[in-house]
Image (tube, helix red, strand yellow):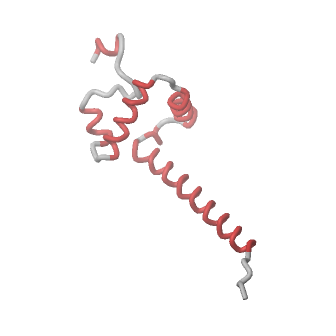
Amino acid sequence: MRKVRDYDAELKALGDKARALKAKKVQQLGELVTSTGADALDPDMLAGVLLAAVGSANAEEKEAWRSRGAAFFQGRGRKAWRRTGGDGKGGKQTGASEEQA
């Protein structure tokens, strides 16, 4: 005779697993904000920066952000990026700020 499946228990286990994964994701995002130093920004500015990144259609700019993120995770981090002349704005230096640099 076949064993009867307990669908309620399976559904509960899946729900618990989904909640655990969501909690882990939230924790990792918090750690990322802290490790990059973005926790020094006020929440409105941080939200604005993230929304600008999500809404950006400029593929070149997105690739620059991606490569800087990859460099960060490879251990070169913020200090190495600052030594290479990053402007702290998430993009390339342009105009007057380039002349002052």
Front residue of 79/74: it is 74
x, y percentage for residue 6? 73, 77
Q: Is residue 93 above or below residue 16?
A: above
Q: What residue occupies the far bottom of the structure in this picture?
A: 1
x, y percentage for residue 92? 36, 22
Residue 4 placement, left or right of 32? right
In the rendered image, the quadrant that contains the C terminus is top left
Front residue of 92/12: it is 12
At a point 29% along the width and 35% down the height, the residue shown is 81
Residue 37 placement, left or right of 84? right
Front residue of 75/12: it is 12
Residue 78 placement, left or right of 33? left
Front residue of 78/11: it is 11
At a point 46% along the width and 22% down the height, the residue shown is 58
In the rendered image, the quadrant that contains the N terminus is bottom right
Q: What residue occupies the far front of the structure in this picture?
A: 1
At a point 28% along the width and 39% down the height, the residue shown is 79
At a point 35% along the width and 35% down the height, the residue shown is 68
x, y percentage for residue 84? 25, 30
Q: Is residue 10 above or below residue 101?
A: below
x, y percentage for residue 8? 75, 72
